[in-house]
Amino acid sequence: MDIYQVIKKPLITEKGTRQKESYNQISLRVDRRANKVEIRQAVEQLFKAKVLEVKTMNMTGKKRRVGRNLGTKCDWKKAIVKLAPGKTIEFFEGV
């Protein structure tokens, strides 16, 4: 799988910001078929940062209702990547 297909987007949340500041971890939305090795290689090549650990979890889509119609959002995969000490990835700092 191509490294540009593995990482979909960064997850910018309050909890993710605390993890980034305290534990040097970043949260990413990744392709559902990607494994930990592919995620590690994609982060190291795209962001030029040494990865120590990758944790993945499958997230179920939330239930949504519009009028009488019931549905669900798509299921997705989340990865939490721990970076080496001294390495950072800046997404929206300084904006």
Image: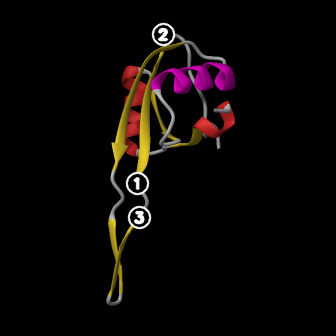
At 38% from the left and 21% from the top, the residue drawn is 23
Q: Please identify the quarter of the rendering in which residue 91 is found.
A: top right
At 47% from the left and 29% from the top, the residue drawn is 35
31 sits to left or right of 61:
right
At 48% from the left and 44% from the top, the residue drawn is 12
Give the main secondary structure of the magenta stretch. Answer: helix
**Residue 75 tag number:** 1
Q: Find the distance from the CA under tag 1 to the CA under tag 3.
A: 7 Å
Residue type highlighted by circle 1: Asp
Callout 1–callout 2 Cβ contact below 8 Å: no
Which is nearer the N-term, disc 2 or disc 3? 3
Where disc 3 sits, the SS reads loop
Q: Which residues are magenta?
A: 36-47
Q: Is residue 82 above or below residue 18?
A: above
Across and down, in percent, residue 60 comes to 33, 53
Residue type highlighted by circle 3: Lys
Q: Please identify the quarter of the rendering in which residue 22 is found.
A: top left
| Image quadrant containing the N terminus | top right
User: Label 3: which residue?
Assistant: 73
**Residue 22, magenta (yes or no):** no
Which is nearer the N-term, disc 1 or disc 2? 1
User: Label 2: which residue?
Assistant: 85
At 53% from the left and 27% from the top, the residue drawn is 39
Q: Which marked residue is nearer to the observer: mark 2 or mark 3?
A: 3
Q: Which marked residue is nearer to the observer: mark 1 or mark 2?
A: 1
Q: Find the distance from the CA under tag 2 to the CA under tag 3.
A: 36 Å
Residue type highlighted by circle 2: Pro
Across and down, in percent, residue 34 comes to 51, 34
Across and down, in percent, residue 24 comes to 44, 21
